[in-house]
Amino acid sequence: MALALLATFFVALARAQSRAELSAAEARKIGVEAVVYGFPLVVMDATMHVSTNVPKPQPNAHAPVNQFGNMLRYPSASDHTAVRMAIDTLYSWA
């Protein structure tokens, strides 16, 4: 996924450069758009890999792909599996 995002960024950059030199403002705009679009995708992909990279379902709701993981206890405030997890919610993921 990150590779596709980089490819999209470089295609947009190549198009901008092919018609003329890229100004600093245009480069900044392209960079901001790439981060706004791509960062949530990268975070979600990383969260998925962390949550599914286990051999069997765990008590912290981590489970392999296509298996349910149920959280048996409320997560602590130090749990950063998912960005800004609500600490008063029991989660189940599949």
Image (cartoon, rainbow, N blue to C red):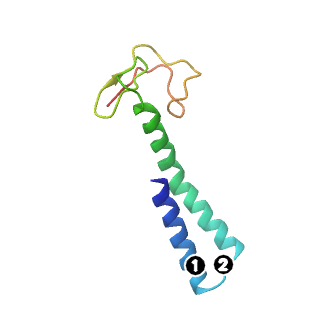
How many marks are shown on the rendered structure?
A: 2
Q: Is residue 5 left or right of residue 56?
A: right
| Outermost top residue | 73
Relative to residue 60, is residue 4 depicted above or below?
below
- Report the residue at 28% width, 33% height from top: 66
Callouts 2 and 1 close, C-beta under 8 Å? yes
Q: Which residue is mark 1?
A: 16
Q: Position of residue 46 (x, y in %)?
A: 49, 41
| Outermost front residue | 55
Q: Nearer the viewer, residue 62 or 27?
A: 62
Q: Nearer the viewer, residue 68 or 32?
A: 68
Q: Mark 2 is on which residue type?
A: Leu
Q: Is residue 57 left or right of residue 44?
A: left
Regarding mark 1 in the picture, which secondary structure is present there?
Answer: helix
Closer to the chain start, of discs 2 and 1, is: 1
- Report the residue at 53% width, 34% height from top: 83
Q: CA distance from mark 2 to mark 1?
A: 6 Å
Q: Which mark is residue 22?
A: 2
| Outermost left residue | 66
Q: Is residue 21 left or right of residue 18?
A: right
- Report the residue at 42% width, 32% height from top: 53
Q: Position of residue 64 (x, y in %)?
A: 35, 30
